[in-house]
């Protein structure tokens, strides 16, 4: 949470296996070892993914795939400690070639 800039909900205990984290007016509910499995992913739309990339690199986040221009978004992929992928994206870049989704 700290590396990605999220803050846990006030009602969560430190050893909670279910809870909520917040950042920039958005909330995510998370559950450990009960619903889902490592390897799942989540996509979050942001205004400027370049700023998110810079922040996460400074904080030491595990970058799974750096900024990449796809037809649907200019996207950054990070991995959380449990192996889940969190994808952040903003509008695709018209001045960059698109990466083929199969590669």
Image (cartoon, rainbow, N blue to C red):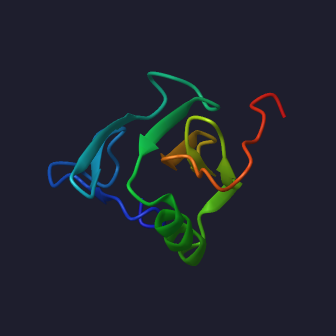
**Residue 75 or 7: which is nearer the viewer?**
75
Q: How many marks?
A: 0
Residue in the image at 31% along x and 40% along y: 28
Image quadrant assignment for residue 44? top left
Q: Position of residue 30 (x, y in %)?
A: 37, 37
Question: In this rendering, would 7 be left or right of 95?
Answer: left
At horizontal 81% and vertical 28% (from top left) the residue drawn is: 102
In the image, residue 23 lies at what x, y percent?
Answer: 29, 57
- Residue farthest to the top? 35
Furthest-front residue in view? 95
In the image, what residue occupies the spot 54% across and 67% down? 56
Where is residue 72 shown, x and y percent of the image? Answer: 56, 35
As drawn, 63 above or below 82: below
Q: Is residue 9 visible?
A: yes
Is residue 79 visible from the viewing direction of this image? Answer: no
Q: Is residue 36 left or right of residue 71?
A: left
Examine the image and state in which quarter residue 103 appears.
top right
Tell me residue 17's x, y (percent): 37, 38
Q: Residue furthest left?
A: 11
Q: Quadrant of the N terminus?
A: bottom left
In the picture as drawn, the residue positioned furthest to the right comes out as 103
């Amino acid at each position: 949470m700290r590396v990605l800039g999220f803050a846990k909900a006030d009602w969560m205990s430190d050893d909670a296996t279910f809870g909520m984290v917040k950042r920039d007016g958005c909330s995510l509910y998370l559950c450990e070892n009960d619903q889902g499995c490592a390897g799942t992913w989540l996509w979050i739309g942001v205004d400027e993914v370049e700023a998110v990339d810079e922040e996460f690199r400074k904080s030491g986040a595990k970058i799974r795939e750096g900024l990449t221009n796809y037809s649907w978004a200019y996207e950054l992929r990070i991995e959380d400690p449990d192996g889940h992928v969190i994808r952040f994206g903003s509008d695709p870049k018209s001045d960059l070639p698109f990466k083929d989704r199969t590669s």
